[in-house]
């Protein structure tokens, strides 16, 4: 799972998508495309953004919820916390030299 997370985070466009979802959860594909275009000057097709979202979803970083014909995307920080906890220890567990 960690490999998929690092692969997803390696792409700067996907990181911008995560930034946008962190700022404002529950966005549709149209909203994400609009924000990428206006805030980051990224003129990407909806299909390209959709493919990026699929990679993020496969890595567990984005969750989707369908409501009627709309699909809402939300950032899932749990995989990131798991990665951080893998190497970062609380101060009281660190060994002193």
Image (tube, grey):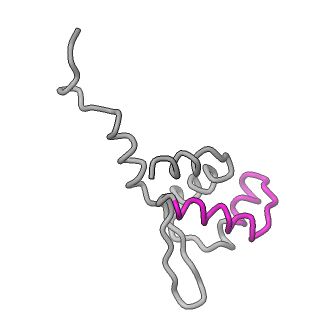
Left or right: 5 in relation to 48: left
- Picture quadrant of residue 88: top left
- For the point 44% across and 60% down, the residue is 76
Count numbered badges in the picture. 0
Q: Is residue 71 above or below residue 55?
A: below
Q: Is residue 59 magenta?
A: no
Instruction: Name the residue at 56% across, 59% down.
Output: 56
Q: Give the quadrant of the C terminus.
A: top left
Residue located farthest toward the left when viewing the structure as drawn:
92
Rendered view: 72 above or below 5: below
Range drawn in magenta: 33-58
- Percent x, y of residue 66: 52, 83
The residue closer to the viewer here, 52 or 28, is 52
Q: Residue furthest bottom?
A: 68
Q: Is residue 54 placed above or below 39 in the rendered structure?
A: below
Q: Is residue 24 left or right of residue 32?
A: left
In the rendered image, residue 21, in percent from the top left (x then y), is placed at 54, 60
Q: Position of residue 80 (x, y in %)?
A: 42, 48
Q: Is residue 59 left or right of residue 95?
A: right
Q: Is residue 84 left or right of residue 95?
A: right
**Residue at the (50%, 73%) spot, across then down:** 64
Please check the rendered image and state whether residue 52 is part of the magenta-colored stretch, yes or no. yes
Q: Give the residue furthest to the right.
A: 43
User: Mostly what secondary structure, the magenta segment?
Assistant: helix
At horizontal 54% and vertical 70% (from top left) the residue drawn is: 73
Image location (x, y in percent) of residue 60:
47, 60
- In this view of the protein, which residue sits in the foreground, 94 or 43? 94
Extreme residue toward the top, this view: 97
């Amino acid at each position: 799972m960690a490999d998929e997370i690092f692969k997803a985070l390696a792409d700067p466009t996907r990181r911008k998508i995560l930034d946008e979802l962190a700022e404002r959860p529950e966005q549709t594909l149209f909203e994400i495309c609009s924000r990428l275009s206006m805030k980051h000057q990224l003129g990407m097709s909806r299909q390209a953004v959709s493919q990026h979202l699929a990679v993020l979803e496969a890595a567990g970083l984005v969750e989707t919820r369908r409501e009627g014909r709309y699909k809402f995307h939300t950032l899932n920080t749990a995989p990131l916390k798991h990665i951080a906890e893998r190497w970062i220890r609380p101060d009281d567990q660190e060994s002193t030299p």
